[in-house]
Amino acid sequence: MKRRPLLAGNWKMHTTVIEACHLAAEIGKCSADLDDRDVLLAPPFTVISEVAHVLRESRVLIASQNVCWEEQGAFTGEISPTMVKSAGGTAAIIGHSERRQIFHEDNGMINKRVHGALHFGLLPILCIGETLEEREAGKTFSVLEEQVREGLGGVSSDDMRKTVVAYEPVWAIGTGKTASKEQAQEAHAFVRKLLAEMYEKDIAESVRILYGGSVNPDNVDELMAQADIDGALVGGAALKAESFCRIINFT
Ligand code: 13P
């Protein structure tokens, strides 16, 4: 099955309003002719609506970097799916390793966020990935399995068709140390096989699995050439228009 590539830039906690608007405008320009792939930006909450405005005539999709399961209420510091949508977003990154490691979000909370996104019509991008310690202890696949099974607990087949999974080995994030194409492909194939056990085979075949962790202009082509790698979730290299434009124009 041919899956439509998805190239996503996660801006993390970077960009003021002005910087965000400039960067978004550049990416709007260099993505204008790309009609065989999806390009997505996940700016900080504070600039989602500005970025959406700058890109209103482009095909670029906008995501939040996290999302709450409730529509509104006393949840200081959170953002609701309806707020994301009203600001121009259509997707949400959920369970990023920085949320897991620094802010102690667990699979249970991440699962609630996935359901919240789906319930209110946002496309969830569920992030999973092992730490270096887990990899060295031979626990990579058991960690991934737990994150997938618990993160997607109770998600229906129909909803799974709309869900994206991002494999981001924690040891490769922001370290300049990319997983080799073989390591990445192996993990992606494992996740797809697991999805085939949890859902129908055609759903597993249609779900896009992104790779994240030190993706850059020099390694994107070989990563994207792997059978089960359907896109990239890019951090550092998404903050410079030149490098992100090269990444989204992968060949
Ligand atoms: P880097 O591309 O900076 O390694 O970050 C990856 C990431 O965490 C994207 O969500």
Image: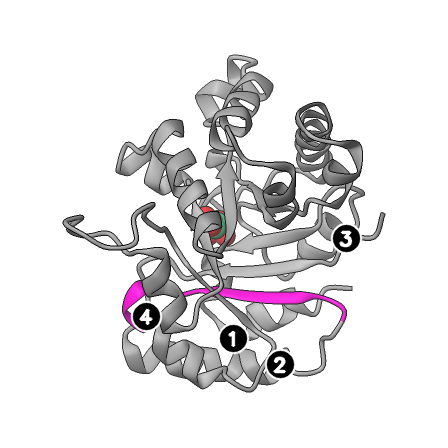
Residue 44 visible in rendering:
no
Quick one: label 4 or label 3, which is nearer the N terminus? Answer: 3
Residue corresponding to mark 4: 15
Residue 9 visible in rendering:
yes
Location of residue 7 in the rendering, given as x and y in whole percent from the top left corner? 61, 60
Badge 3, how many Cα within 10 Å: few under 14, some, many 20+?
some
Q: Amino acid at mark 3?
A: Arg
Q: Report which quarter residue 99 is drawn in.
A: top left
Q: Nearer the viewer, mark 1 or mark 2?
A: 2
**SS type, badge 2:** helix
Q: Which residues are magenta?
A: 36-47
**Horizontal side, residue 216 vs residue 185: left or right:** left
Q: Amino acid at mark 2?
A: Cys
Q: Is residue 40 magenta?
A: yes
Quick one: label 3 or label 1, which is nearer the N terminus? Answer: 3
Label annotation for residue 30: 2
Q: Is residue 17 above or below residue 211?
A: below
Looking at the image, the residue that sits furthest to the top is 137
Q: Amino acid at mark 4?
A: Thr
Residue corresponding to mark 1: 241
What residue sits 30% from the left and 54% below the top?
A: 71
Q: Amino acid at mark 1?
A: Ala
Residue corresponding to mark 3: 3
**SS type, badge 4:** loop
* Residue situated in front as seen by the camera: 6 or 232: 6
Badge 1, how many Cα within 10 Å: few under 14, some, many 20+?
some
Location of residue 5 in the rendering, given as x and y in whole percent from the top left corner? 71, 58
For the residues labelled 3 and 1, say whether their Cβ atoms are less than 8 Å apart. Answer: no
Q: Report which quarter residue 95 is drawn in.
A: top left
For the residues labelled 1 and 2, say whether their Cβ atoms are less than 8 Å apart. Answer: yes
Badge 4, how many Cα within 10 Å: few under 14, some, many 20+?
some
